[in-house]
Image: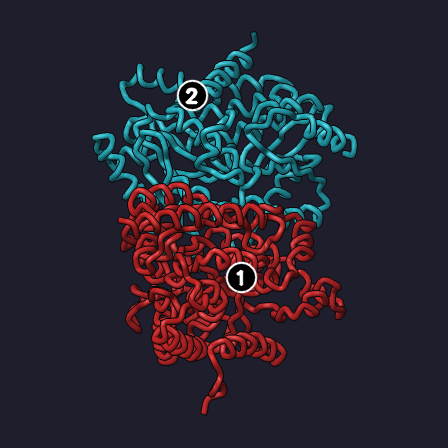
Amino acid sequence: MTETEGMNAKQKLAYYLDKSYADANAAHSKGELVCWSSSIAPAEFCVTMGIHMLYPENHAAAVGAKHGAIEILELAERKGYTMDNCSYSRINLAYMDLLVEEKKTGKTPEALQKLDELKVPRMPLPDIIITCNNICNTLLKWYENIAVSLNIPYIIIDTPYVHDWPIPQHTIDYMKEQFKYAIKQIEDLTGKPFDYEKFVKVQEQTQRSVAAWDRAMGMAAIVPSPLSGFDMFNFMALIVCARSQFAAEDTFNTLADELQVKADAGQDAFKGGERTRIAWEGIAVWPYLSHTYKALKNLGMNMVGSTYPGAWSIHYEVGDLGQMAAGYCKMYSNTCLDNKVNVISDVLINTNCTGILYHLNRSCKLMSFLNVETAEILKEKTGIPYASFDGDQTDPRNFSEAQYDTRVEALSEVMEQMKAEKAKA
Amino acid sequence: MSKVDTIIAELEAISKNPKKAMDDFKAKTGKGAVGVLPVYAPEEIVYATGYLPIGVWGGKKQISKAATYLPAFACSIMQSIMEMEIDGVYDELAAVLISSPCDTLKCFGQKWKGKSPVIQFVHSQNRNIEASNTFMVEEYKVIREKLEKILGVTITDEAINNAIEIYNENRAVMRMFSDVVAMYPQIIDPIKRHAVIKARQFMDKAEHTKMVRELIAEIMKEAVVPYKGKKIVLTGIMAEPDELLDVFKEFDIAVVADDLAQETRQFRTDVPAGTDPMERLAKQWQNMTACSLATDRDKPRGQFIVDLVKKHGADAVIICMMKFCDPEEYDYPIMLEDFEKANIKNLKIEIDQQSVSMEQIRTRVQSFVEMM
């Protein structure tokens, strides 16, 4: 019997997320090693060596979703960061300072107490950090600041921007060498030789987790869809933090089974209210998750298309470091416009979306600055209408509910009209 | 007009009219120019083709059309380049080179609206392993092949090695120039200093070297006298527009050294010796230090600037913060700690190439000078 026997997918999600923080905190107090990692960095190396992984982006999203962002964002701004810097990073860097202060003084700073009261999970300070710039170069700077502030080892997995598709061989070769260097850094820190046998097992687990994730997220393709993309946003936390663990496989297989049952019964995520299907391009607006969801739901717009699921769909043959490198490098925002358009186009086709909503994210230049070109090309290619709204992943000051609602309503009108015309034809 | 003034006036004219510089070059050589966007590129490969590598760093330009393609939170350099791209300003360039060290530039290389072919490339960011050099060699080979194809030329190793020597010589002379300015701030004010440095973006480096050498020799004929104003070190991407430097001049602020991406970061690291030019160029990137665009686990930039302040007996540091430049903005809080530890006075001012009013900056600079 497993520890999660009898739990549904949502319960498993909550259980494993809590456990990941609890385990890391317990490990930290026993003197075991903790690593902070960017969300799509290869976890396989650290997990192999028993290092506990924590994910600042997940944590910052939780701070945002629990409405604890503003005060902590202001702390970062007081230190010299600007409102224009990624809000995930500002939250994390200010959080790091609070933990350092607590460690130094033995007293819990007020801002940290408030986050505790909001039940934002605690992250212990890291002993090592790993970042992979497949999702942005901002991470390189953010983690550089952590490394120098805490004076800890910094693993970089540099995935050079793929300006011309496909990924060139010299990029793969460079990444393979970086994997070797990462292993050396971990060996130096742990004082132990890298366990290559366990590495194979961890890779196998990662592939099983990814397969389960693919299976669950693939349910969004069914018409009507038993899965809402906003559930996808919630479940995503686990593919981020437990990709190399059984937790992810366990939860996503359960989720896929549940969704299959719903689909077989002809149920959709809106209990029969799915009128249209749209894709969401960009990161969620965590402080306004509920508002962004409800505004769509009220119009019967089910968000079923997203490039998010594919971001963690990293497939490779176990033992093939070249494939592993390509898997981590191919993240669509790390590739040229042509490939980006193809990835989103595939999402639209596979999930039967007839509209697309672009999040112009103040925190994320890489996921925003090609939106206009992407939208224009996709409109030309597929005829699918789009709308764009201004927002931010975790800074609530950069989002307007009214603007969002207006844009969504306008998109809905066009989509409904096109639907009616299609039906007439 | 003194010889010093004559040389400076000539360089200043070039720095303010790159189009003319390009046309003159074309008329003289029969060859065109290749644009080089910020911040770093292996210009030597371009130089080896016989074409003129020409800096594309934006400028003062009212933004209207660019707003369709770039949100307001893109830096002003990219805003003005985009505006000028759409206006066809760069269409005479035979090609443009765009690196990808920040998220904005990654996207920018994919959305060029001008007619010139774009050659985008990447710098490695895990620079302390040998594989970083191997990667850069391959990336530079792609640039070389694309340039050969676009320009219809063959680029020999010998030509690149020759270009490297010319560039290294220019770098050495420019470092010397910067040190000489620090000794003679009463002769070279911030605007003149900037013009001499900026002109190198639009000139054959061999000619620029010759002129700056002559300039240095002329300046050094003068006596070194104590400077009555304040001495500062600038850091950031750039210190433009000129109106900003006017403010410095107005308050007798001398720039005795800089850590600007547009200025000394361009010439403080030589291309090392060797036989294979591509390996030499790759190694130069690995050797670059204290730059916001070159990831460095030790983050030495703050200390690097502290050392500059000490070396030149500067009174303070002015941080020219390019608005919306992530790499620079992330360096700032850490630099600030380094400056505070070293007890170095500092002032952060926001840089926007499109700034129309300097009033706020003038007030802040004035009170900063009074505080010093």
Q: CA distance from mark 1 to mark 2?
A: 45 Å
In the displayed orientation, state which residue is furthest to the top.
B1
Residue at the image position 28 percent from the left and 30 percent from the top: B49
Toward the viewer: A159 or A265? A265
Specify the colour of chain A. Answer: red
Toward the viewer: B136 or A336? A336
Specify the colour of chain B. Answer: cyan
* Residue B246, placed above or below residue A84: above
* Residue A372, placed above or below residue B247: below
Q: Hey, what amino acid is under mark 2?
A: Pro
Q: Chain of mark 1?
A: A
Numbered label attached to residue A258 = none
Q: Hey, what amino acid is under mark 1?
A: Glu
When asked about the image quadrant of residue A277, the answer is: bottom left
| Horizontal side of residue A130 vs A219, given as left or right | right
Residue at the image position 39 percent from the left and 49 percent from the top: A415
Q: Which residue is mark 1?
A: A57
Q: Chain of mark 2?
A: B
Toward the viewer: A276 or B16? A276
Question: Where, quadrant-wise, is the N terminus of chain B in this rendering?
Answer: top right
**Residue A244 in sight here:** yes
Q: Which residue is mark 2?
A: B18
Task: Name the spot of residue B221 as percent of width and height, x first.
Answer: 58, 17
